[in-house]
């Protein structure tokens, strides 16, 4: 990773501003009052912090531009959540957050490679979302985000989906004592709705009215996915007999289900 390059993401790193403690305090005070320009100056004034963090990942093969953008997201989160009343240096608070963002990106990026252009759109969308959330204290819609960054809504959705972190259905989302509620417990199963259960019960009842041979043919054909020839070989009759028995079985089942 060429983290020592002079220009990253169009930013000349040799000309990055360096804020004094007094300037930081003043900008944080203005930012907390909703001053967007002050927030932007805080971001620009702390980009050296992002650079110092991504150098820790110089052993990776990840593109420096991509990692720098990810680090900037961590920086913005740190700025928006920093509590000055704790009397902690901003860098002490921000560095772990930037590192965490970079590690999360590297972890997720190992399994799924996302194109550079899609990642750029996703980062712009995340930045726009954070900005609207901060300025208006509400969650923006995809339409608003797309308009803010000048992109089609569908492209924004695609980009955000591309960098979304995969999750396991067995990830716990709530736990109290020894009982855990897993993600899979909250997933709607369209295949097992009540009306489908009723259909399954009716189908089983219809099959119970078939002869043993007809039942076996229907099971092999439609539940195990075998061809008529394979069924014929398995139960030692001709393919023509299988076809005739299958048609008769389906006719009887349909007559029962139509009652």
Image (spheres, rainbow, N blue to C red):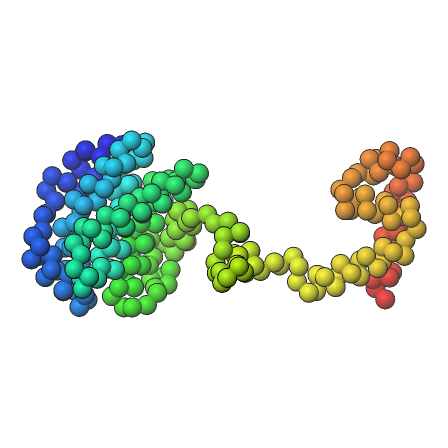
The quadrant of the picture occupied by the C terminus is bottom right
Left or right of 20 on screen, residue 8: right
Front one among 61 and 182: 182
Residue 87: x and y, percent? 16, 60
Left or right of 43 on screen, residue 216: right
Q: Quadrant of residue 198?
A: bottom right
Query: Number of labelled discs?
Result: 0
Residue 133: x and y, percent? 29, 64
Left or right of 142 on screen, residue 136: left
**In the depicted structure, whether residue 144 falls above or below residue 94:** below
Q: Quadrant of residue 32?
A: bottom left
Residue 244: x and y, percent? 90, 44
- Can I make out residue 36 in this image? no
State the residue at coordinates (24%, 66%). 135
The quadrant of the picture occupied by the N terminus is top left
Front one among 151 and 189: 189
- Can I make out residue 104 in this image? yes
State the residue at coordinates (91%, 48%). 212
State the residue at coordinates (46%, 47%). 166
- Residue reaching furthest to the front: 177
Front one among 8 and 87: 87
State the residue at coordinates (41%, 53%). 157
**In the depicted structure, whether residue 115 falls above or below residue 195:** above
Residue 109: x and y, percent? 39, 40
């Amino acid at each position: 990773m060429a983290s020592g390059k002079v220009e990253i993401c169009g930013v000349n790193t040799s000309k990055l501003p360096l804020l004094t403690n007094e300037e930081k305090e003043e900008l944080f005070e203005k930012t907390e009052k909703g001053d967007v320009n002050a927030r932007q100056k805080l971001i620009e004034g702390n980009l050296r912090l992002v650079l110092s963090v991504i150098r820790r990942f110089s052993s990776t093969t990840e593109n420096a531009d991509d990692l720098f953008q990810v680090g900037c997201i961590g920086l913005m989160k740190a700025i928006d959540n920093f509590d000055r009343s704790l009397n902690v240096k901003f860098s002490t608070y921000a560095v772990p957050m930037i590192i965490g963002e970079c590690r999360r990106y590297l972890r997720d990026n190992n399994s799924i490679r996302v194109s550079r252009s899609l990642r750029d759109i996703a980062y712009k969308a995340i930045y726009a979302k954070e900005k609207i959330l901060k300025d208006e204290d509400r969650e923006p819609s995809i339409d608003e985000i797309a308009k803010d960054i000048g992109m089609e809504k569908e492209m924004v959705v695609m980009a955000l989906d591309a960098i979304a972190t995969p999750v396991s259905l067995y990830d716990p989302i709530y736990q109290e004592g020894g009982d855990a509620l897993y993600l899979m417990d909250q997933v709607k199963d369209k295949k097992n709705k009540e009306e489908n259960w009723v259909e399954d019960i009716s189908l089983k009842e219809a099959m119970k009215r078939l002869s043993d041979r007809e039942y076996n043919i229907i099971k092999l054909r439609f539940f195990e996915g075998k061809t008529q020839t394979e069924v014929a070989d398995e139960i030692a009759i001709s393919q023509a007999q299988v076809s005739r028995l299958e048609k008769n079985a389906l006719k009887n089942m349909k007559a029962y289900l139509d009652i």
